[in-house]
Each structure stands twice: as structure tokens, then as C-alpha cells.
Image: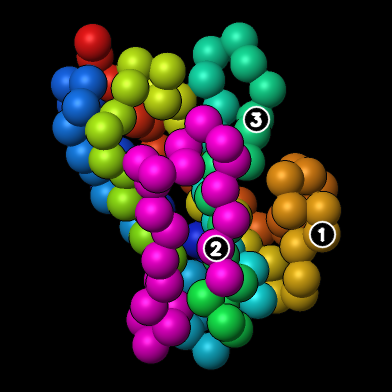
Amino acid sequence: QVQLVESGGGSVQAGESLRLSCAVSERTSRMVYMGWFRQAPGREREGVAAIWTGGGNTYYTDSVKGRFTISQDNARNTAYLHMNALKSEDTAVYYCVANPRPAVPLWDVGSWPLWGQGTQVTVSS
């Protein structure tokens, strides 16, 4: 069974950076879309960033535009989330997501059949 393996979470100060990684356990399992959701305590899970692996098109929720960058390494079947200028409101559990088909609607939790185990990101102000 294909799994998503996340790494890279941690605790930082506001303004600092972190990079999250998400590797697909089977390199021959190609995903059409990969992305990241997050869930803060007491809040609903929300989509953060996504990438179409076929063309590299990227998508972001408004609150992270200009600060977060999603990228891919197709050879490694891995996606990355580069998070800069982190804010306390970015504190959440971050989940990698993937879909071997087009993920539509993009920010709908139900559009993503594969989920990582989640990694905690804590930003202190």
C-alpha cells in the first residue's frame, strides 16, 4: 500500500524558516497532484499549498502566498514545502496529501485519497 512519509517539522521563532518533505513510499506510484493541509487546535483542516506534478503549476491559500513555496522532485517522488517568514498563526499539524488523479476541488479534504501521518510545526512569537 502506498504511503506518504513526512519529515521536517519542529519548533521555531517567528520570522524563521522550515522545510517539510513528503516522500511517496513507492517510487513507481506517480501522483498527479501533491499538496499540504494543516490543522490548528480547535480549527478545521485547511489546504495550504498544492502542485500539479505534470507541469509544476502551484497553488496557495491566501494566508501563505509570498511566504511558502511548494516544489517537487519527480526523480525522488517527493514534494517539499518551504516555509519562510513563519508566523505564530502558522502553528499547526501539517499533513502531506497526494492524488494519482486530478484533485478537484483542490481545497476539499475529500479530493485527496492519500494522507501523511502529520508533522507538528510550532512557531513562537
Q: Tell whether position 67 is magenta.
A: yes
Place of residue 111 in the rendered image (x, y in percent of width and height, measured from the top left): 79, 54
Amino acid, disc 1: Val
Q: How many marks?
A: 3
SS of the residue at dot 2?
strand
Cα separation between marks 1 and 2: 14 Å
Amino acid, disc 3: Arg
Q: Quadrant of the C terminus?
A: top left
Query: Which badge, 3 or 2, comes first in the chain's sequence?
Result: 3
For mark 2, what is the residue? 58
Cα separation between marks 3 and 1: 17 Å
Bounds of the magenta segment: 57-78
Q: Quadrant of the N terminus?
A: bottom right
Does the image show residue 1?
Answer: no
Q: Nearer the viewer, mark 3 or mark 2?
A: 2
Place of residue 113 in the rendered image (x, y in percent of width and height, measured from the top left): 73, 58
For mark 1, what is the residue? 104
Q: Nearer the viewer, mark 1 or mark 2?
A: 2
Badge 3 density bin: few <14, some 14–19, many ≥20, Cα 10 Å: some
Badge 2 density bin: few <14, some 14–19, many ≥20, Cα 10 Å: some
Amino acid, disc 2: Thr
Place of residue 32 in the rendered image (x, y in percent of width and height, measured from the top left): 65, 76
Residue drawn where x is 37% and y is 31% of the image: 120
Name the disc covering residue 45, or none.
3
Badge 1 density bin: few <14, some 14–19, many ≥20, Cα 10 Å: few
SS of the residue at dot 3?
loop
